[in-house]
Image (cartoon, rainbow, N blue to C red):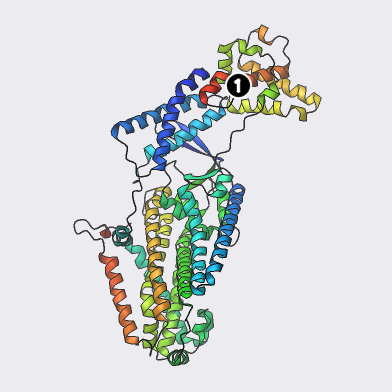
Amino acid sequence: MKTSALFIRTPEGIVFSQWLAGPVTRFIAWFIDQLCISVALSILGIALHLLELINWNFAVALNVISYFVISIGYGIFFEWSWRGQTIGKRLLRLRVVDVEGMRLQFNQIVVRNLLRCVDALPAFYFVGGLTCWLSPRCQRLGDLAANTVVVRNPRVAEPDLDQMLAGKYNSLRQYPHLAARLRQRVSVTEADVALQALLRREEFDPAARVELFGKLAGHFRARVEFPDEATDGVADEQYLRNVVDVLYRTHPETRAATGQPQ
Amino acid sequence: MIVDLQRFITAGRPLWAELERMLDRLEAEPDLRMTLPQLQLFHHLYERTAADLAKITTLSSEPETRRYLENLVARAYGEIHETREKRRRFFPVKWFFQTLPQTFRRHVRAFYLSVAITVAGCAFGGLAIAFDPDAKPVLMPFSHLLQDPAKRVAEEEKATQDRLAGFKTTFSVELMTHNTQVSIFTLALGMTWGVGTIIMLFYNGVILGAVAVDYIQAGQTKFLLGWLMPHGVVEIPAILIAGQAGLMLALALIGRGSRASLRTRLREISGDIVTLIFGVGVLLVWAGFVEAFLSQYHEPVIPYEAKIAFGTVELILLSLFLAKSGTNKKADPGNQDQ
């Protein structure tokens, strides 16, 4: 079964996940790497052109060997030096990791890079792309042989809650124990649905907006029951704002403790 | 479970930061050996952080903290549960004289298979030329091989000018890089369950057999040996070793007779494949030099006997190197196979 994440269960029973990179993102990273290789070869070519004036034979030999070493060694060098990243992968926040979460070994990096010549067949990584698309963990042949996967570490975007919540009074915060229970009971997916609904609120038709926020507010009201004085007179949309505020917004003291920006 | 987020983060932060510092140091210094108290602290921090991750995983809030802890636990997990030997300093001489020949011997059956396929190709190519000389253009895609051997030998022996003058280094490097690319490709095609590797080895054998029979039929055996042996006795085994690595990959994929999972089988041979292909690279560098600087010169410049003798010495040394180098009489790993 194809999955979008690599789940690893430690012997202690802890599960951590890493998001797998898809073929398109990887292709873009590869394209950036090819540009980097081309630039490096062009610069070297200019330098060797000057050397040709002194010794043509040596300069051409050096050019041939440089092309070979750079084109094959680029991926190996960067993935080893930058712990699974090349320039392209770093720009797209991708990283090569061991499929079982172990430390990435030099052998694995060499194998996955040497097998590029088969993955690249017949052109533009068709074999690799097809294998990646069919593979449950989005692995090309080189990854399968080396027991590696490419994961992505997207920057978790912090929504502009201050703008969205407009600093209004949140009656739910008056009940910290219930707010804590709400955080505990609401799943990640549910919280994300509430947040997305608020972020896209202007895109809905008025009737649909009222209906949607009514349903969502009802859902969250059923999750944790707050006293009437906290909910009376609060519109559905405002109730959802309050819920998102409880779920997402961290107190200034907590921000300071985690080192997050204020 | 209800978590007081503020207290949870305030309490956990110093421990996470300490674990992150230790991980950064471990990753920056691959040779670092921790003392027992450091190891105990590292393990304690890992367990605490993993427990914190378990607590926060159930919470919808704090996605950044969760991702941060997941990242820390993932990195620490790799360090703690890794059982493969950590890379220490690389000793090229030890690697070349011990690791490489030992690895070769450990998988010698794959090498024999590689030889058998090439010999079958040689037999096919030789027989094809013997029975149908017109098949030469089909079997040999190189224009300089299509010429009549006797005519070529006469031309080479009459030549008064060095046709490689001012071009030897470039020619040598081109040979090295081309042959290394072919070797890497032969290895990589092991991922086709060995079909691609077998085709490559067989085809190399076909060309070799066809050329050999063509020259022998033309009565140019001495020239053939003098031309091919100086570089061929190293280059051909190098390609065979690349084939060996490709077949190892294929055998690991097929997994016949093994109860280990595919992942385990591939993990077991990964290091050996890399050792072999780097060894192939070293051999091909030597072969490239010899081919450019020696093999292309014939009588009267260099007597054929001298070239054949040189090739024979190389072959003996290479055989001794692969068979005996790095042998430990008490426990020779070469006696084991996959």
Residue A112, how many percent across, how many down? Answer: 48, 53
On the image, the x and y values in percent for residue A110 come to 44, 54
To which quarter of the image does residue B283 belong? bottom left
Relative vertical location of residue A31 with respect to residue B298 in this rendering, above or below: above
Q: State the residue in front, A238 or B177.
A: B177
Q: In the depicted view, which residue is nearer to us: B9 or B224?
A: B9
Q: Is residue B183 above or below residue A197?
A: below
Residue B120 image position (x, y, % from top left): 41, 74
- Placement of B61 over or under B85, stated as above or below: above
Is there any visible trace of residue A54 in the rendered image? yes
Query: Label 1 is placed on what type of residue?
Result: Leu
> Callout 1 environment at 10 Å: few (<14), some (14 to 19), or many (20+)?
many
> Would residue A156 appear left or right of B254 to someone viewing this image?
right
Residue underneath mark 1: A247
Residue A35 in the figure: left or right of residue B33? right
Q: Chain of mark 1?
A: A
Residue in the image at 31% along x and 75% along y: B314
Q: Residue at x 49, y 74 (%)?
A: A57
Comparing B228 with B258, the one in front is B228
